[in-house]
């Protein structure tokens, strides 16, 4: 008997043109030109949603995704864009695609995918309406209500070459060229209640590509100033940077982030002078509301950042109280070299995700900034963060010293600027991980959020902290707040949200949340397997364990090893949540006895 080929879990999208033979019979050349343009559009949309086209077969497209939400949101976006294109064509020239989406096992071989998972996606496509989307039960469960669309149950369908009937759903409001959400989600309603803005990555117009860090820093500084105002909602820089790299206009990029206004601009640095341009765009109309150009000696860059932020806030929400604006300003350095060192340090640090070498390079930059200006608060808070990373990531030669330095430098940053939200966040982290003092950590986190109510990492960390502190409702709320501000890169908080939902006994919700993560870590795989275990879905748990082995190593551990993993990895305050997780893992067959 031959060995069974290895499988892996994937999300498969299959799209095909409805009535293609009839259309080619009417006008073969025109239909082929339209199809070619539409296939290019579909490919770009799939790639922008983190998917990969595996192959084309005439008028059909097969694509693979790692996350269910990416695949379904990509399918919806494809149908929306095609509906817009078709509106400009005569009715007998319109190409309408049917799309099927399935979550299942596939065989990957020589750059393509095969197996029942692919076959089911193709059969789902054939059941969809022209311009519509049909999904399997596993996809419907994973999406839930996260995209604001409802699903119509089509019942069990017997499809060709598949033994068992397939439970099938149609996405409502999509079909015949119409793409409208059935109802706005609660989060969308909350966002629309306040003015919202996406700060897109400014362009580097200098000839020197080494100045990219400077332009990134200018963009981030303007965004950070805007983040301090509760009156507006600000998209996180990670999501903004992602859409900034796509070949789409400012209005479209802003819409994709779910924001009402988009800020774009450019920076040209030459010698001791800098030119900064900034434009504010209304995403709904595409109209430019405001534009300004600043030609300054480079030391005045801080004044420009404040002026741009203040003008935007005044336009969006009216005149802000002078005392509040004054409180929101940074106590910045006037030393440009120190400022550039901090920008380089942040560039290397990568928002808590850098490697050991990145962290060390980042630390060197922050230390150099402090040598140049010993009262530069942002340099101290950045330096404190590097020691937290060293303490927590397992490469420190002396974790106790690293933890002490994190506390020391965070306190110093706050001493120099009590309104440095990031310093309070780092200090909260240090109190929790170094001192295991949940109350002091909670107090510092509260202050960090008050000072910067739009900073994604405040909420992402808060979701994690609250889950481990036993405050599950707050954890889930903070995850949603994080996703509001970082809709395209939510992985950082989805692990914590999934664990909070699991601990709250919301196992189906936990499965749906974890399935959205593009690259789960061991805690994600473990939480997913435990959720399936609690629901008695042992076969699904086994598949997840196999996935974990492929990507993260052996998932099966002894009772003691799992306790150590959860205690060291998540720093739970009490033992009960750990026992709850181990119970689910035991039911999933992942606890060695």
Image (spheres, grey):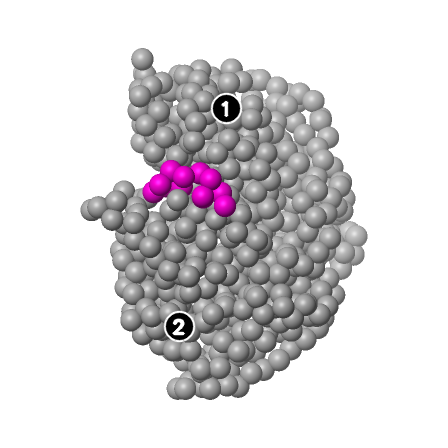
Highlighted magenta segment, given as a residue range? 432-443
Disc assigned to residue 330: none
- Asked whether residue 248 is in view, the answer is no
| Image side of residue 344 versus residue 63, left or right | left
Residue at 45%, 22% (x, y): give it. 576
Q: Which residue is mark 2?
A: 339
Majority secondary structure of the magenta segment?
A: helix
Q: Which residue is mark 1?
A: 531
Q: Can you give x and y, in whole percent of width and height, for residue 306 in the image?
A: 56, 73
Q: Can you give x and y, in whole percent of width and height, for residue 169 in the image?
A: 67, 30
Q: Which residue is most to the top?
A: 593
| Image side of residue 475 versus residue 427, left or right | right
Q: Can you give x and y, in whole percent of width and height, for residue 43 in the image?
A: 55, 52
Q: Which residue is most to the left?
A: 397
- Asked whether residue 77 is in view, the answer is yes
Comes first in the chain, label 2 or label 1: 2
**Image quarter in which the N terminus is found:** top left
Residue at 53%, 78% (x, y): give it. 303
| Image side of residue 52 versus residue 76, left or right | left
In the rendered image, residue 435 lying in the magenta stretch gets the answer yes
Task: Tell me the crowding category of disc 2: few under 14, some 14 to 19, or many 20 or more residues within 10 angstroms, Cα based.
Answer: many
Separation of disc 2 and disc 1 at Cα? Answer: 47 Å
| Image side of residue 135 versus residue 444, left or right | right
Q: Secondary structure at mark 2?
A: helix
């Amino acid at each position: 008997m031959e060995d069974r080929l290895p499988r892996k879990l994937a999300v498969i999208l299959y799209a095909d043109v409805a009535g293609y033979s009839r259309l080619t019979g009417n006008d073969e050349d025109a239909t082929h030109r339209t199809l070619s343009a539409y296939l290019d559009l579909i490919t770009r949309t799939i790639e922008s949603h983190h998917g990969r086209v595996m192959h084309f077969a005439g008028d059909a497209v097969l694509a693979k995704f790692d996350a269910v939400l990416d695949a379904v949101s990509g399918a919806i976006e494809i149908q929306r864009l095609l509906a817009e294109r078709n509106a400009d064509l005569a009715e007998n020239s319109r190409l309408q695609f049917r799309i099927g989406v399935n979550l299942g096992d596939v065989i990957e071989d020589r750059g393509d995918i095969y197996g029942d998972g692919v076959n089911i996606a193709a059969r789902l496509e054939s059941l969809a309406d022209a311009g519509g989307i049909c999904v399997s039960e596993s996809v419907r469960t994973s999406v839930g209500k996260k995209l604001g669309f409802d699903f119509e149950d089509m019942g069990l369908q017997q499809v060709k070459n598949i033994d068992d009937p397939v439970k099938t759903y149609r996405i409502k409001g999509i079909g015949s060229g119409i793409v409208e959400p059935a109802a706005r989600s609660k989060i969308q309603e909350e966002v629309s209640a306040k003015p919202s803005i996406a700060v897109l990555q400014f362009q580097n117009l200098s000839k020197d590509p080494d100045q990219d860090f400077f332009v990134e820093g200018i963009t981030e500084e303007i965004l950070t100033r805007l983040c301090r105002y509760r009156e507006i909602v600000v998209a996180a820089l990670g999501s903004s940077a992602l859409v900034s790299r796509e070949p789409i206009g400012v209005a479209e990029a802003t819409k994709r982030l779910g924001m009402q206004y988009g800020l774009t601009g450019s920076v040209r640095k030459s010698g001791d002078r800098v030119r900064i341009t900034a434009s504010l765009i209304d995403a709904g109309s595409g109209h430019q509301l405001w534009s300004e150009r600043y030609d300054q000696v480079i030391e005045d860059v801080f004044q420009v950042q404040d002026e741009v932020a203040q003008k935007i806030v005044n336009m969006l929400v009216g005149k802000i109280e002078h005392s509040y604006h004054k409180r929101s300003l940074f106590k910045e350095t006037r030393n440009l070299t120190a400022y550039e060192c901090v920008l380089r340090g942040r560039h290397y640090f990568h928002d808590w995700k850098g490697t050991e070498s990145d962290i060390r390079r980042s630390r060197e930059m922050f230390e150099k900034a402090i040598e140049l200006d010993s009262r530069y608060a942002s340099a101290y808070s950045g330096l404190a963060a590097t020691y937290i990373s060293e303490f927590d990531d397992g490469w420190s030669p002396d974790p106790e010293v690293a933890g002490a330095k994190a506390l020391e430098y965070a306190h110093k940053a706050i001493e120099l600027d009590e309104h440095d939200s990031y310093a309070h966040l780092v200090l909260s982290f240090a109190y929790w991980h170094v001192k295991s003092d949940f109350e002091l950590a909670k107090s510092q986190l509260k202050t960090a959020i008050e000072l910067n109510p739009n900073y994604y990492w405040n909420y992402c960390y808060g979701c994690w902290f609250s889950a481990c502190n036993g405050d599950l409702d707050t954890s889930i709320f903070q995850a949603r707040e994080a996703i509001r501000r970082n809709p395209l890169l939510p992985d950082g908080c989805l692990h914590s949200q999934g664990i909070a939902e699991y601990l709250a006994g919301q196992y189906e919700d936990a499965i749906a949340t974890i399935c959205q993560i593009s690259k789960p870590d061991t805690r994600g795989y473990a939480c997913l397997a435990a959720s399936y275990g609690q629901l008695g879905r042992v076969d699904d748990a086994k598949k997840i364990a196999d996935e974990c082995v492929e990507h993260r190593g052996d998932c099966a551990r002894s009772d003691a090893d799992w306790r150590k993993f959860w205690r060291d990895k998540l720093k739970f305050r009490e033992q009960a949540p750990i026992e709850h997780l181990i119970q689910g893992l035991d039911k999933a067959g992942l606890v060695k006895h």
